[in-house]
Image (cartoon, helix red, strand yellow):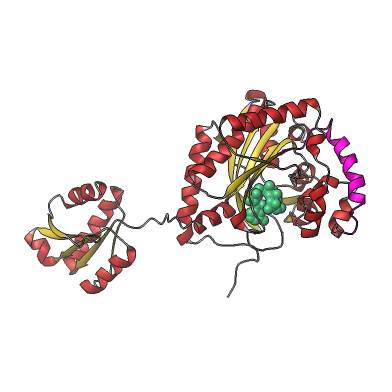
């Protein structure tokens, strides 16, 4: 038997109702907050990710699914969406027509990481990106949107962490201050961190190795090194969050894995997830549009990890399974034929109806109705058709009533709608 590729997964029918619930709710909220959908391809030129995510990052160094196409081009399955959204913003001149715009996109991402709980090689994200706004209220509004999503989904135990990564003016000073500290941690840091200690010291904050995490507890704080503009920007983000009563924790060790982030950075963490506890992450990336060949327009965005969000919701035992409303137990050929007609008519009226095609015994059909979890069952035999009335059984109360065959669909639809 041919099996799934390692790190990939199927999302089974028993789970898709929950996925759809999340997708519909998030999409609606995004539209309420003024976002329009952009659909981007799954495949891009490798160069796009190398330039935007950064060559020194884990993603670009070892996690991308890259191959040479028959024409000799190096192509990559997208590991994240922001790079593509920025490419589209530039390529289609969106920046010229609507420099200030809010875009969202959803779909699968691909990273060849070590598969483990909460870490897949194909996973799903919902991405929101805002272009053209320097104002810290844009950052706050985006976080408000993210936390509204968390709230509406009734996700419990999800906490917001925020930080500022400064800007090209002030960050170099912090990196310099970090280096002597890191030189004193040679024993504690993993080989990967030692390698990037000089070139990319801030990345070490993002390392998941426990000894590295522990070593960084006493590291200097970037918040002590912010320039006046960055400090004021961060203050407004915080006061806006206060104003909308969004609780947050300031975490000066919060960095993003990707190169292009500036100023506001945030993450939503949920302890219940265990080691991979980030449900969503985002922040400002003011230099990225320009770095990818576009105008000097700022950006701020977030990505929700849908797989982890779903895992949390599933653990909270909410059920979104869509059961059929009605089962028609039909006995006899004529009754079967009539039921077949009714089933289709019910569906046209948005009533989810099911029947058996096998002409099984009443007992076995009632068992099927129970298994499907329907709220009503119609019981119809050839004799009932002759008498002009069939039995409608309420599966919860077990009460039965006769419904005239004439106008049956309308009557039953009304009964189910007034439930
Ligand atoms: P992590 O710290 O968990 O590695 P990340 O910083 O690499 O996450 P981002 O690139 O910011 O993640 O992506 C945003 C969100 O996408 C994460 O918060 C997470 O929920 C989800 N995510 C990232 N990588 C994976 C993966 N391999 N499998 C499932 N979800 C993922
Ligand atoms: Mg990662």
- Above/below status of 57 relative to 358: above
Residue 209, horizontal then vertical, whole percent: 77, 59
Residue most toward the left?
387
Q: Quadrant of the N terminus?
A: bottom right
As for residue 412 lying within the magenta part, the answer is: no
As for residue 174 lying within the magenta part, the answer is: yes
Magenta residues span 163-187
Visible in this render: residue 97?
Answer: yes
Residue 69, horizontal then vertical, whole percent: 74, 54
- Above/below status of 76 relative to 152: below
Q: Nearer the viewer, residue 234 or 329?
A: 234
Does 57 sit left or right of 29 as displayed?
right
Q: Quadrant of residue 357?
A: bottom left
Visible in this render: residue 77?
Answer: no
Q: Quadrant of residue 390?
A: bottom left
Residue 144, horizontal then vertical, whole percent: 57, 35
Does 103 sit left or right of 187 as displayed?
left
Does 375 sit left or right of 312 as displayed?
left
Residue at (89% x, 47% y) in the render: 181
Residue at (53% x, 32% y) in the render: 33
- Above/below status of 143 relative to 2: above
- Above/below status of 194 relative to 266: below
């Amino acid at each position: 038997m041919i099996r799934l590729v390692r790190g990939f997964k199927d999302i089974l029918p028993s789970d898709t109702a929950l996925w759809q619930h999340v997708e519909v709710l998030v999409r609606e909220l995004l539209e309420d907050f003024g976002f329009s959908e952009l659909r981007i391809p799954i495949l891009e030129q490798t160069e796009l990710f190398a330039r935007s995510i950064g060559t020194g990052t884990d993603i670009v160094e070892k996690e991308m699914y890259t191959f040479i196409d028959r024409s000799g081009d190096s192509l990559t399955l997208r590991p994240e969406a922001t790079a593509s959204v920025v490419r589209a913003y530039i390529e289609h001149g969106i920046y010229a027509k609507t420099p200030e715009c809010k875009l969202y996109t959803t779909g699968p991402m691909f990273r060849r990481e070590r598969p483990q709980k909460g870490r897949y090689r194909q996973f799903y994200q919902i991405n929101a990106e805002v272009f053209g706004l320097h104002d810290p209220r844009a950052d706050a509004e985006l976080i408000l949107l993210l936390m509204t999503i968390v709230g509406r989904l009734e996700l419990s135990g999800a906490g917001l962490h925020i930080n500022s990564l400064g800007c090209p003016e002030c960050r170099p000073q912090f990196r310099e201050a970090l280096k002597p500290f890191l030189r004193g941690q040679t024993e504690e840091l993993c080989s990967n961190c030692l390698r990037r200690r000089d070139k990319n010291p801030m990345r070490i904050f993002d390392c998941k190795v426990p000894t590295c995490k522990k070593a960084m507890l006493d590291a200097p704080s970037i918040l002590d090194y912010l320039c006046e503009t960055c400090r004021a920007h961060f203050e407004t983000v915080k006061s806006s969050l206060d104003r909308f009563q969004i609780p947050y924790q300031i975490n000066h060790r919060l960095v993003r894995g990707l190169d292009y982030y500036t100023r506001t950075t945030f993450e939503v963490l949920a302890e219940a997830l265990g080691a991979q506890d980030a449900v969503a992450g985002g922040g400002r990336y003011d230099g990225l549009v320009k770095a990818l060949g576009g105008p000097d327009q700022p950006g701020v965005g977030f990505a929700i990890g849908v797989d982890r969000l779903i895992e949390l919701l599933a653990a909270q035992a909410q059920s979104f399974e869509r059961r059929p409303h009605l089962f028609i137990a039909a006995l006899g050929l004529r009754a079967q034929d009539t039921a077949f007609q009714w089933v289709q008519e019910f569906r046209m009226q948005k009533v989810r109806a099911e029947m058996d095609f096998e002409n099984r015994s009443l007992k076995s059909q009632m068992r099927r109705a129970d298994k499907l979890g329907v709220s009503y069952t119609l019981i119809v035999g050839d004799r009932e058709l002759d008498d002009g009335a069939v039995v409608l059984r309420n599966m919860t109360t077990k009460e039965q009533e006769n419904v005239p065959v004439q106008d049956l669909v309308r009557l039953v639809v009304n009964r189910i709608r007034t439930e």
